[in-house]
């Protein structure tokens, strides 16, 4: 039987922070629009900000559907599954916001992620999610799977880029500045990365 939580703390927080992968789901307001579901999982790229807010680093990729949907309507669901240990699924339904590199809040948020080198992965934004509904469910149908390690390919690919070449890469991609459904995505040209504080 599922349980509803008022805050992200205690065992719930520990469970979320221990999972090596989570999923994000967003959609445009248009009922004919494209629903987006994305896996996230580079070690150190997720953090619990407080009892109601979490954040993750939005890295370079083939599109920017999540960013576009959040800019339009803010709706997002995050999901974690227990692939080891007792069965469990946790969902955080809430409102998300992409905080871009030129936002005054960006350096302070970025400082909360000390377990990953963002310069190696083409960091685009910090996604901040404020929880509106926090629930768990049994997870009985989730298989046992083992986590070995992060794949090195993303970091190897994007460590070669500086701000200018990364921005040029995004400008060539079909669905980065504009989503599949024509919504504004990542603002380009990409603002330069602020200096480390």
Image (spheres, grey):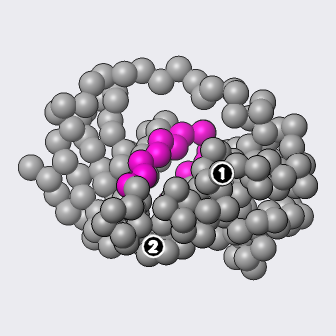
Residue that sits furthest to the bottom in the current view: 104
Residue 52, position as x, y percentages in the image? 41, 71
The question of residue 19 being in magenta is answered with: no
Rendering quarter of residue 103: bottom right
What is the spatial separation of the Cα atoms under label 2 and label 1, in whole angstroms? 22 Å
Seen in the picture, residue 172 relative to 158 is either above or below; the reply is: below
Seen in the picture, residue 174 relative to 92 is either above or below; the reply is: above
What label sits on residue 99 in the rendered view?
Answer: none
Front disc: 2 or 1: 1
The question of residue 49 being in magenta is answered with: yes
Residue 12, position as x, y percentages in the image? 33, 53
Tell me if I can see residue 130 in this picture: no
Query: Which one is earlier in the sequence, the residue at label 2 or at label 1?
Result: 2
Q: What residue lies at 32% left-to-right and 35% top-to-bottom? A: 82
Residue 50, position as x, y percentages in the image? 49, 68
Name the element at disc 1. Answer: loop
Q: What residue lies at 69% left-to-right and 34% top-to-bottom? A: 154
Q: What residue lies at 25% left-to-right and 64% top-to-bottom? A: 5
What label sits on residue 74 in the rendered view?
Answer: 2
Name the element at disc 2. Answer: loop
In this view, the residue in front, 48 or 21, is 21
In this view, the residue in front, 22 or 70, is 70
Circles 2 and 1, Cβ within 8 Å, touching? The answer is no
What label sits on residue 174 in the rendered view?
Answer: 1
- Quadrant containing the C terminus is bottom right
Q: Is residue 49 left or right of residue 174?
A: left
Extent of the magenta region:
35-52
Tell me if I can see residue 158 in this picture: yes
Q: What residue lies at 78% left-to-right and 73% top-to-bottom? A: 102
């Amino acid at each position: 039987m599922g349980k509803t939580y008022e805050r992200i703390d205690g065992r719930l927080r520990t469970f979320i922070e221990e999972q090596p992968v989570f999923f994000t789901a967003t959609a445009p307001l248009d009922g004919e629009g494209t629903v987006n579901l994305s896996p996230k999982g580079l070690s150190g790229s997720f953090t619990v900000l407080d009892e109601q807010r979490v954040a993750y680093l939005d890295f370079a990729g083939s599109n920017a559907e999540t960013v576009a949907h959040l800019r339009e309507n803010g709706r997002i669901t995050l999901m974690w599954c227990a692939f080891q240990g007792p069965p469990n699924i946790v969902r955080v339904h809430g409102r998300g916001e992409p905080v871009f590199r030129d936002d005054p809040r960006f350096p302070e948020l970025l400082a909360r992620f000390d377990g990953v080198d963002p310069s190696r992965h083409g960091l685009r934004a910090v996604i901040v999610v404020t929880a509106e509904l926090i629930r768990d469910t049994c997870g009985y149908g989730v298989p046992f799977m083992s986590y070995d390690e992060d794949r090195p390919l993303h970091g190897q690919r994007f460590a070669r880029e500086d701000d200018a070449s990364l921005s040029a890469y995004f400008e060539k991609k079909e669905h980065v500045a504009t989503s599949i459904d024509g919504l504004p995505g990542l603002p380009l040209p990409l603002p330069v990365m602020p200096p480390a504080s």
